[in-house]
């Protein structure tokens, strides 16, 4: 079994589709409502953003998904996202990420 990171947009769409087929559990409903509340991009936009940010040197799959979920607008936000991975990105790389995100907002 392999691990795969999915965005909140994908969670939103998967749970919404599943909700149309059957009654969701309470925790699934809560996850669906959270994803609906915070995910502003379409699934296609989110996948494109993840792919584009994933091409930036030093950005892992998990970081790309987190960036697509949080849509950082400031360099401090990007630093907070990558701090969990104990990465330090150059200011030019952070600026590149912010430019990519800005295209999708």
Image: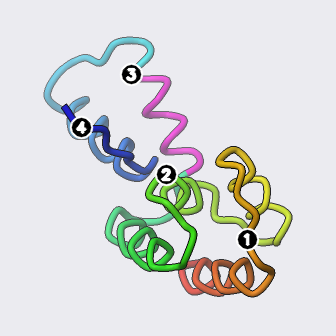
Between the residue at mark 1 and the residue at mark 2, the CA separation in whole angstroms equals: 15 Å
Where's residue 61, x and y in %? 44, 58
Magenta stretch, main secondary structure class = helix
Q: Residue at x 54, y 66 (%)?
A: 59
- Mark 1 or mark 3, earlier in chain: 3
Q: CA distance from mark 2 to mark 4?
A: 14 Å
Label 3 neighbour load within 10 Å: few <14, some 14-19, many 20+: some
Label 2 residue SS: helix
Name the spot of residue 97 as percent of width and height, x first. 64, 78
The circle drawn on residue 28 is: 3
Mark 3 vs mark 2, foreground winner is: 2
Q: Is residue 60 above or below residue 62?
A: below
Badge 3 marks a residue whose secondary structure is helix
Which quarter of the picture shows residue 90?
A: bottom right
Task: Name the residue beneath numbered marker 2.
Answer: 62
Q: Is residue 28 above or below residue 1?
A: above
- State the mark number for residue 89: 1
Counting from the top left corner in percent of width and height, residue 29 is at 42, 23
C-alpha distance separating marks 3 and 2 = 22 Å
Residue 98 lies within the magenta run? no
- In the image: residue 48, left or right of residue 33: left
In the rendered structure, which disc, 2 or 4, sits on the residue that comes first in sequence? 4
Q: Residues within 10 Å of mark 4 (few under 14, many from 20)?
A: few
- Say which mark, if any, is on residue 2: 4
Between tags 1 and 3, which lies in front?
Answer: 1
- 65 relative to 45, above or below: above
Q: Which residues are magenta?
A: 28-38
On the image, the x and y values in percent for residue 45 come to: 40, 73
């Amino acid at each position: 079994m392999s691990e795969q990171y999915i965005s909140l947009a994908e969670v939103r769409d998967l749970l919404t589709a599943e909700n149309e087929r059957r009654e969701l559990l309470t925790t699934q409903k809560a996850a669906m409502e959270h994803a609906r509340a915070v995910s502003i991009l379409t699934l296609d936009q989110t996948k494109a953003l993840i792919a584009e940010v994933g091409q930036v040197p030093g950005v892992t799959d998990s970081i790309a998904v987190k960036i697509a979920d949080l849509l950082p607008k400031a360099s401090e936000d990007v630093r907070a996202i990558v701090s969990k991975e104990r990465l330090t990105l150059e200011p030019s790389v952070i600026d590149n990420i912010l430019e990519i995100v800005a295209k999708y907002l």
